[in-house]
Amino acid sequence: GSLVRPANYVKPAEGDEARKWKTPTELARPLFNHWCDFVAPGLKEARREAAAAGKAGQAPQPLDYEVPRTTGNRQAPFIVTFSPAAISLAIKALCFTCADLQRQPPVASLPDLAVVVRQWKRTGVDDVSGTTKVSHCTVLCMVRADTRLDKL
């Protein structure tokens, strides 16, 4: 399956089943939120304040938020996949996320999203049989489109 974990992820207790996304739409929402938090960490609070002011009966104010030019030392969101079906689901979800980023006015000014694909291979020896096991995974790293490729 696919996996999206925030930086403050805590491993579930034993017996808890890991969250599995069944559709690209289910996965697109956390991807959208993680991307917005990554490129514009104060945007969520600014939107909450604007909504609270609107509920309090104040005149709606334009959202006053400037996107930072750099993301500091925060780690960019990524998706780890272990099967072709998971890669397909993740790519569709990323397409939905990009469409949402272009469609919603408060976030339409955020930096464009690009994806860097990395493939990892892990080789190990099975303790019981002694045979060599090879595990493959594909990691889809979400980066700002204006990031220089030599910096990745």
Image: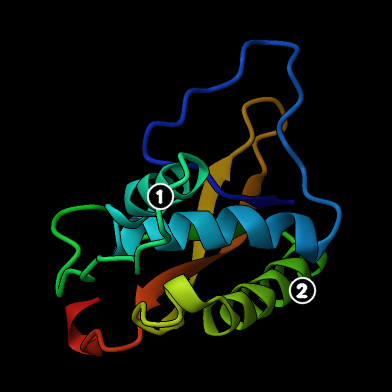
- Inspect the image, locate mark 1, and give the three-letter code of the amino acid beneath it: Gln
Name the secondary structure under disc 1.
loop
Q: Quadrant of residue 143?
A: bottom left
Q: Is residue 69 above or below residue 50?
A: below
Which residue: 44% across, 71% down? 106
Give the position of the C terminus as an image quadrant. bottom left
Q: Is residue 118 above or below residue 147?
A: above
Nearest the eye: 13 or 54: 54
Left or right: 72 in relation to 74: left
Separation of residues labelled 1 and 2 (CA atoms): 45 Å
Percent x, y for residue 122?
51, 53
Left or right: 73 in relation to 128: left
Q: Which mark is residue 58?
A: 1
Image colouring: rainbow
Left or right: 88 in relation to 123: right
The answer to whether any part of residue 77 appears in the image is: no
Which residue: 67% across, 63% down? 28
Percent x, y for residue 29?
64, 57
Q: Quadrant of residue 111?
A: bottom left
Q: Which residue is mark 2?
A: 88
User: Which of label 1 and label 2 is nearer to you?
Assistant: 1
Residues under numbered marks 1 and 2 in contact, where contact means CB atoms less than 8 Å apart: no
Nearest the eye: 75 or 58: 58
- Inspect the image, locate mark 2, and give the three-letter code of the amino acid beneath it: Ser
Earlier-in-chain disc, 1 versus 2: 1
Percent x, y for residue 24?
78, 65
The answer to whether any part of residue 138 appears in the image is: yes
